[in-house]
Image (tube, rainbow, N blue to C red):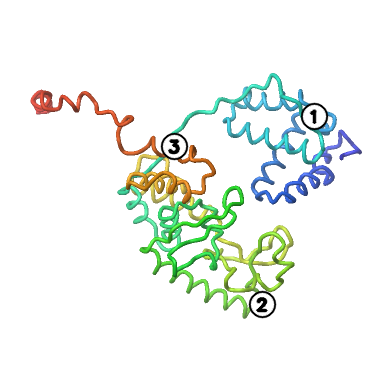
Amino acid sequence: MLTESRNSSTEIASPRLLDRLRDAIRRRHYSRRTEEAYIHWTKRFIYFHGKRHPCELGEAAVTAFLNHLATDRNVAASTQNQALSALLFLYRETLGTELDWLDGLVRAKRPQRMPVVLTMEEVENILCALEGTQWLMASLLYGTGMRLMECLRLRVKDVDFGYSQILIRDGKGEKDRITMLPRRLIDSLQTQLQKVRQLHVRELREGFGEVHLPYALARKYPRAGFEWDWQYVFPSKNRSADPEDGVIRRHHLDETVLQRGVKSAARASGIPKPVHCHTFRHSFATHLLQSGYDIRTVQELLGHADVSTTMIYTHVLNRGGRGVLSPLDQAAVSFASVEGARTM
C-alpha cells in the first residue's frame, strides 16, 4: 500500500503496490504478457484518477475509467475487457477487496468478425516467398496449427520424430496438447536441430549454453538448463541478460522476426488480405474441416476448451454465402448468350 507522498510524481513507480500485484500474478503462474498488461492497466487507472491510490477508489472510479475507454478512447471490446480483468484482479487478489456489480458500465460493442483464411494456393505462395528458418517456422504454423509463441518456445525434447508428433507445452491456459509433425518437414527440422546442436556445443565450450527453465525447475535441477533436451529449436542469434535474474542466456528467436517476414512475403505474393502469423492457424483449421475431419478432432488439435470456439471455422468454408447457390448461377444457361453479347 502506498502511504507516503500521495501527490508525488514518483508514487506511480513505488514498488509497494506494483510489486504486490506482480507477486499475486506470478503465484498463479500467469504469462509474462498477462503480467505486463495488468501492470499497464493498473498504471493507466491510477493516472486517470490523478495518481490517487486504488484503496481510495471504488466501483464508481472503475466504472468511470472503463467508460472513458469505451466512449472517449473508442477502444475495442477486447481491450476494455482486458482492462476490466486487470482491475478486478488488482482489487480482489492484491488489495483483498471485492468490487460490487459495476452499474452504469458502458460496454464496448464486440463485433462479430470472421477470421482471415488463406486458400491452399495462397499459403503455398507465401511459403515460397520465405527462406531458411522463417520458411520452416511458417510451415510449422500452417502444418500443425500452433500459435506463434508456441512455435518459438518449442524445445528439442518436445519434437518426437519416432511418433511424428509435437508436444506443445504450456499453451494458452497452461494446457499441454499433442499435434502432428508434418512428414514434409521432418528432414528440414532435423537439419535445423543439427545446426542448433553445433551452436550448443560451441556455447558450452565458451562457458554458456544455458536456457531459461519454467517455474522452479532451475532450482530443482541446476544443470538442466545446460542439457541438450531443453534447448530451443529456434534460438536467438544473440545472447542476452534474462530480465528475471540477469543471467546471460540464449533465448528463443524474437517473434518480430517471423511477423515481419510473413507480412513481407504476403505483400510480395500480391495477396489482398491482411495476413499475419495467426492466419496460418485459421487456415490450418479451415482446411482440415474442408478435408472432412470432424470438428472434435480439429478442436483437440487447436487446444480449444470449448467446441463453440472451433465452430467459427465452419462459417468460412469455401461454400459461398452459407452454402446457397446464387440465382444468377442457377440461371447461367439462359444468361450465357446475353453475357456473351455484352462482353463482345
How many other residues sit within 10 Å of disc 1, few (<14), some (14-19) or many (≥20)? Answer: few
Question: Nearer the N terminus, badge 2 or badge 1?
Answer: 1
**Residue pointed to by mark 2:** 207
* Image coords of residue 168 (percent x, y): 53, 57
Question: Which quarter of the rendered picture does the C terminus lie within?
Answer: top left
* Image coords of residue 276 (percent x, y): 45, 46
Q: Nearer the viewer, residue 149 or 146?
A: 146
- Residue ranking furthest to the right: 4
- Measure how far apart labels 1 and 3 are at the Cα level: 43 Å
Determine contact: label 2, label 1, CB under 8 Å. no
The amino acid pointed to by label 3 is Ile
**Residue pointed to by mark 3:** 312
- Residue ranking furthest to the top: 104
How many other residues sit within 10 Å of disc 3, few (<14), some (14-19) or many (≥20)? Answer: some
Placement of 330 over or under 200, stated as above or below:
above
Query: Is residue 263 among the parts visible in the rendering?
Result: no
- Measure how far apart labels 3 and 2 are at the Cα level: 50 Å
**Residue pointed to by mark 1:** 50
Query: Is residue 23 among the parts visible in the rendering?
Result: yes
